[in-house]
Amino acid sequence: MNYKKILLAFENPKGHVKVLKSALDLTDKYSGELKVLHINSNMAGVPSMARREFEKRFTQEELQDIVNEHNVTKVPVTIEVVTTNNVIDTVVDETKEADLLVMGHEHANMFIAAISDTTDEKIVNNIHCDSLIVNL
C-alpha cells in the first residue's frame, strides 16, 4: 500500500513526540502529506479516573511549533485543531479522506479495560483506512 494521505491523531507531547516522528517518517517515505489533528475536548484538563483521551488543550500555533521542531525532512503538514465532545466520531470521520491513521496507545488500567474499550480501540474499530498504532 502506498500511503499518500496520512492522518495523525495527536494527543499531547508527552510520549506523543514518538508518534509524531513515526508519522513524519512514513510521510517522508511515501512522499505523502500529513494532517495533524488535535481535538480539544470540552472536558480537557478536567481530572477523571475514566477519561484520558486528548487531555491537553492545544492551539494551532503550539502544535505548529512542535511539528516544526521535529519535521527535519520538511514533509508537507497541515494542522487542524477541533473542539468537540465527540472525539471518536470526529477522528473516524477524518479517516474517510486518509490512507493511514497514526495514533499512540497507552495501556488502560485494569478497571477501565474491564468495563470498556479505550478511546483508541473505539476509533480503530470504526475507521475507514489502515492504522498504525504506536505503543507508548
Image (tube, helix red, strand yellow):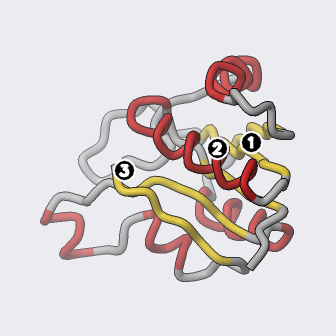
Q: Is mark 2 on a helix, strand or loop?
A: strand
The residue singled out by tag 3 in the image is 51
Quarter holding the N terminus is bottom right
Of labels 1 and 3, earlier in sequence is 3
Residue 43 x %, y % = 50, 40
- The CA distance from mark 1 to mark 3 is 18 Å
Looking at the picture, which amino acid does disc 3 mark?
Arg
Looking at the picture, which amino acid does disc 1 mark?
Val
Residue at (69, 27) in percent of width and height: 72
Of labels 2 and 1, earlier in sequence is 2
Residue 99 x %, y % = 77, 71
Between 104 and 68, the one nearer to me in the picture: 68
Is residue 93 visible to the viewer in this orientation of the structure?
Answer: no
Between 36 and 25, the one nearer to me in the picture: 25
Q: How crowded is mark 3: few (under 14 residues within 10 Å), some or many (20 or more)?
A: some
Between 68 and 126, the one nearer to me in the picture: 68
The residue singled out by tag 2 in the image is 39
Is 8 rendered above or below residue 98?
above
Left or right: 27, with 123 as reference point: right
Contact? badges 3 and 2 (CB < 8 Å): no
The residue singled out by tag 1 in the image is 82
Residue at (53, 82) in percent of width and height: 125
Left or right: 81, with 48 as reference point: right
Contact? badges 2 and 1 (CB < 8 Å): yes
